[in-house]
Image (spheres, grey):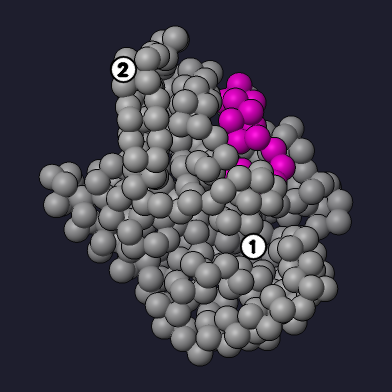
């Protein structure tokens, strides 16, 4: 099993230069990959171009860029650019994102259609392969043009953010890997089964598809405090319907039902709803729902503790079919120095060691 790093996008104290520094730390400590998730701050392609210029061996990628806010052509251009700068080390992670980001921050319509995602992947692949574009789909269109440069590779790998089983099936047909986030071990096993079944039906070897799980990890000597922070974050995520459904399907029916009802009531209170909408990491953003997350539910997602404990927990994911374990450092910090110290501590604490 490979080990990757998710560069933390959530800390407002960190800028692009800090993310580059963290990627360099990961490369020095033997990580196989460093990916960056685009959210409400730094542009993923710009950050990864900077990382590409500062590193030499580590695989780079996005985890993920949100497809409703970019045309397929813009995404293909960004991916090809980073792949050239990195010397062919880039992997493109794509996902639908979520309704709140797309409709509020970007002011666009959110249409989470599997077919649209499939069309998007097809267009991106064709553009990077320098095909003369004549694509007319049900949702997307790209015609009468050809990519004007020479990519480092004409087959840049594409991973899909996958949690819904329909997305797993699509990935089995068209993707080089999957990037699940907030997937419990029980649910992940089901996902891998669907992924592999779909791949075999499409005439593909399932072993060639990377199961790249993003794991929230927090190496700390104050685990109880960290657990309560993580508990609030998990409660916050349960206001997204697809995460709530996943926890329900993973065997946490009681917790998921209680959280769903709590968030239904919060949605009816304008003041509480505003508190949730600010940020998952602001104090009180869970609107009092954190106690509804059980210890068992918390431990199904988060890896929290000393370095030895966290290394063993991460390594155990290989038994579930994970082929790349992406360490996603966690924590809420008040200064840049505190954030860097904590994130570097996590990176070093679970590092696979120099290659």
**Which residue is label 1 attached to?**
218
Q: Residues within 10 Å of mark 2 (few under 14, many from 20)?
A: some
In the rendered image, residue 108, in percent from the top left (x then y), is placed at 61, 45
Of residue 245 and residue 192, the one placed in the foreground of this image is 245
Q: Which mark is residue 267?
A: none
In the image, is residue 221 part of the stretch drawn in magenta? no
What residue is rendered at 13% in x and 45% in y?
Answer: 203
Which residue is drawn at the image coordinates 66% and 44% (left, top)? 106
Q: Earlier in the sequence, mark 1 or mark 2?
A: 2
From the viewer's perspective, is residue 65 above or below residue 161?
above
* Residues tagged 1 and 2 counted as in contact (Cβ below 8 A): no
The magenta region covers 37-53
Disc 1 secondary structure class = strand
Compute the Cα span from label 1 to label 2: 44 Å
The residue that disc 2 covers is: 131
**Residue in the image at 64% along x and 75% along y:** 235
Can you give x and y, in whole percent of width and height, for residue 283 in the image? 82, 69
Q: Check the image and report above or below for 115 versus 299.
A: above
Residue 152 higher or lower than 347, as above or below: above
Asked whether, in this view, residue 293 is left or right of residue 1, the answer is right
The answer to if 48 sits in the magenta stretch is: yes
Q: Nearer the viewer, residue 68 or 160?
A: 68
Q: Is residue 140 left or right of residue 349?
A: left
Q: Residues within 10 Å of mark 1 (few under 14, many from 20)?
A: many
The furthest residue to the right: 335
| Horizontal and vertical percent position of residue 276 | 74, 68
Q: Position of residue 168 (x, y in %)?
A: 33, 56
Along the line of sight, which residue is nearer the eye, 166 or 327?
A: 166
């Amino acid at each position: 099993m490979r080990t990757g790093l998710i560069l933390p996008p959530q800390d407002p104290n960190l800028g692009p230069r800090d993310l580059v520094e963290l990627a360099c730390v990961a490369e020095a400590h033997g990580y196989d990959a460093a990916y960056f998730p685009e959210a409400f701050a730094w542009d993923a392609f710009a950050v990864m171009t900077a990382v590409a210029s500062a590193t030499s061996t580590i695989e780079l990628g996005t985890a993920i860029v949100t497809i409703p806010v970019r045309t397929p052509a813009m995404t293909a251009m960004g991916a090809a650019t980073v792949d050239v700068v990195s010397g062919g080390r880039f992997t493109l992670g794509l996902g639908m994102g979520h309704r709140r980001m797309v409709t509020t921050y970007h002011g666009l319509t959110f249409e989470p259609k599997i077919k649209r995602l499939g069309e998007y992947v097809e267009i991106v692949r064709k553009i990077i392969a320098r095909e003369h574009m004549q694509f007319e789909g049900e949702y997307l269109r790209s015609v009468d043009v050809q990519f004007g440069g020479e990519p480092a590779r004409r087959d840049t790998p594409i991973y899909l953010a996958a949690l819904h089983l329909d997305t797993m099936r699509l990935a089995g047909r068209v993707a080089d890997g999957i990037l699940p986030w907030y997937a419990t071990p029980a649910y992940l096993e089901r996902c891998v089964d669907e992924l592999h079944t779909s791949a075999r039906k499409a005439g593909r070897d399932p072993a060639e598809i990377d199961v790249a799980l993003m794991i929230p990890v927090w190496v700390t000597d104050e685990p109880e405090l960290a657990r309560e922070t993580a508990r609030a974050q998990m409660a916050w995520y349960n206001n997204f319907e697809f995460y709530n459904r996943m926890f329900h399907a993973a065997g946490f029916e009681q917790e998921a039902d209680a959280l769903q009802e709590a968030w239904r009531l919060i949605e009816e209170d304008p003041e509480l709803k505003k508190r949730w909408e600010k940020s998952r990491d602001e104090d009180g953003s869970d609107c009092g729902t954190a106690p509804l997350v059980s210890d068992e539910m918390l431990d199904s997602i988060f890896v929290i503790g000393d370095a030895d404990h966290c290394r063993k927990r991460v390594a155990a994911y290989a038994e579930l079919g994970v082929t790349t374990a992406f360490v996603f450092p966690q924590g809420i910090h008040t200064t840049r120095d505190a954030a860097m110290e904590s994130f570097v501590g996590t990176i070093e604490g679970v590092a696979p060691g120099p290659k």
